[in-house]
Amino acid sequence: LELEKIKDESDSHYFNLALVMWKGGDKLTALSTINKALEKNADNIKAKLLKIELLAQLSRMSEAVMFVQAWLATNKGEAAALKVLLALKKAGASTHAIIASLESLLEQTFRRNIVAFLSDLYFEVGLYDKALLSYHKLEKIVKDPSLRAKLLYQIGYTNFITGQMNEV
């Protein structure tokens, strides 16, 4: 590969090289190369996304989830990282692994977007008590009337399906 002969040590060079390898079907070498790009610049969003794509294609979902967890721990690009977790979930990553990953982040600090994402995951897998606790935490801090109404609906609906009619 001609790109490999270039003596460029930048993250963008390694990203482009990994992209060519990936498109050529050499996913393992592409993964190794994208790791070099991330060593040069850990904040390279394109490199992060390519690494996650490669891990998913290599059926290494738990590793992909752990990588996103590390990304979220940096407090950079939270919205993008949460969207990636949703995509990984749809691609077959374990919802319970994603929940565990997010819970470990919340042990360090409260983050509204993560609590909101986690609340819906709890609800989806039937952990209604945890969902309600999370929804109530959010209700206390949300100021936007529209978002607050959605939270109150979710609280009421969760109480209804769990038979807690006195709470609806």
Image (cartoon, rainbow, N blue to C red):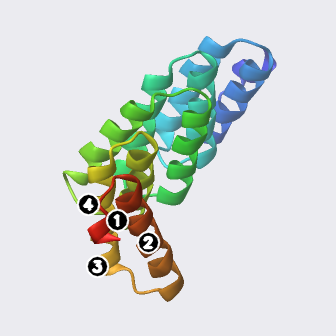
For image coordinates 25% across by 53% down, the residue present is 106
For image coordinates 51% across by 18% down, the residue present is 60
Q: Are marks 2 and 1 in contact (CB under 8 Å)?
A: yes
Locate the N terminus by quadrant. Answer: top right
Does residue 19 lie above or below 69 as drawn? above
Instruction: Give the numbered dot on residue 140.
Output: 3
User: Badge 4 is on which residue?
Assistant: 133
Q: Position of residue 95 (x, y in %)?
A: 44, 34
- Viewer-nearest residue: 44 or 132: 132
Q: Quadrant of residue 166?
A: bottom left
Instruction: Give the numbered dot on residue 50.
Output: none
User: Badge 1 is on which residue?
Assistant: 135
Q: Are marks 1 and 4 in contact (CB under 8 Å)?
A: yes
Q: Amino acid at mark 1?
A: Tyr
Q: Taking 3 as reference, is 91 left or right?
A: left
User: Badge 2 is on which residue?
Assistant: 151
For image coordinates 56% across by 47% down, the residue present is 44
Does residue 29 lie above or below 168 as drawn? above
Q: Secondary structure at mark 3?
A: helix
Q: Amino acid at mark 3?
A: Lys
Q: Position of residue 58 (x, y in %)?
A: 59, 15
Q: How crowded is the residue under tag 2: few (<14 C-alpha within 10 Å), some, or many (20+)?
A: some
Q: Taking 156 as reference, is 41 left or right?
A: right
